[in-house]
Image: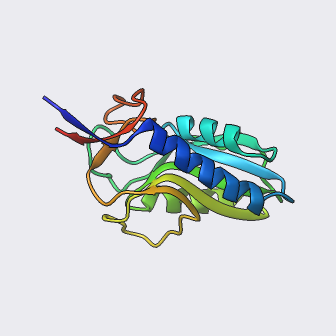
Amino acid sequence: MPELTEILSRKDIETNISGIALRISEDYKQGNLILVAALKGAFMFVADLARSLSIPSQIGFVGVSSYGAGTESSGTITVTKKLDVDIEGKDVLIVEDIVDTGLSLRFIIDYLAEFKPRTLKTCSLIDKRERREVDVVVDYACHEVSEGFLVGYGLDHNENYRHLPAIYHLKL
């Protein structure tokens, strides 16, 4: 039977998103910001982040997958949904649920760079560096978590647990 241990409460998540939103709003107050969320995991985060910004923004989506049904990245990244907004010449903030190995984020950065944005930065709900395999910069991180397989608030295991309002360590 799977065991769930809460590591970030809904209140912790809300507080940290508000703080990051203030920084982003200040940094992009002169720009034409487009949030590009990585599906499926970042859908809750990008919605809450967008509502917390004090500046206008557009939202686009891109889908990538590297996990399948396991708890370890396969290392092979595939596009499951192509970019759905024009980002050429615009300020783009990639919104991720979690940066773990860095492979997916590196893939998304390289993919979006082909569309010639003016700037390209990253924002993640969770920056988890314990298994980082590639050098990627998370410009805005709401939380740093050191270990465990995490679910809830959009993060899943085999498409389950996304609905949970907090972040949990999943032990199978």
Whether residue 153 is visible to the viewer of this picture, yes or no, is yes
Does residue 121 sit above or below 96 in this rendering?
A: below
Depicted 11 relative to depicted 127: above or below: above
Residue 73 percent location from the top left of the image: 32, 52
Q: Going 36% across and 68% down the picture, which residue do you hit?
A: 133
* Residue 156: % across, % down: 37, 36
Which scheme is used to colour this image of the protein? rainbow
- In this rendering, position of residue 151 left or right of residue 53: left
Q: Nearer the viewer, residue 111 or 137?
A: 137
Q: Is residue 120 left or right of residue 15?
A: right
Q: Residue at x 65, y 62 (%)?
A: 121
- 33 shown above or below 102: above
Camera sees residue 116: no
Furthest toward the left, the residue is: 1
Left or right position of 121 against 72: right
Outermost residue toward the bottom? 135
Q: Is residue 44 above or below residue 107?
A: above
Left or right: residue 45 compared with residue 23: left
Q: Residue at x 68, y 59 (%)?
A: 23
**The image quarter in which residue 24 lies:** bottom right
Q: Position of residue 39 (x, y in %)?
A: 53, 39
- Number of dots carrying numbers: 0
Q: Quadrant of residue 153?
A: top left
**Rendered-image quadrant of the N terminus:** top left
Q: Position of residue 21 (x, y in %)?
A: 66, 51
Residue at image position (65%, 47%) is 36
Q: Quadrant location of the C terminus? A: top left
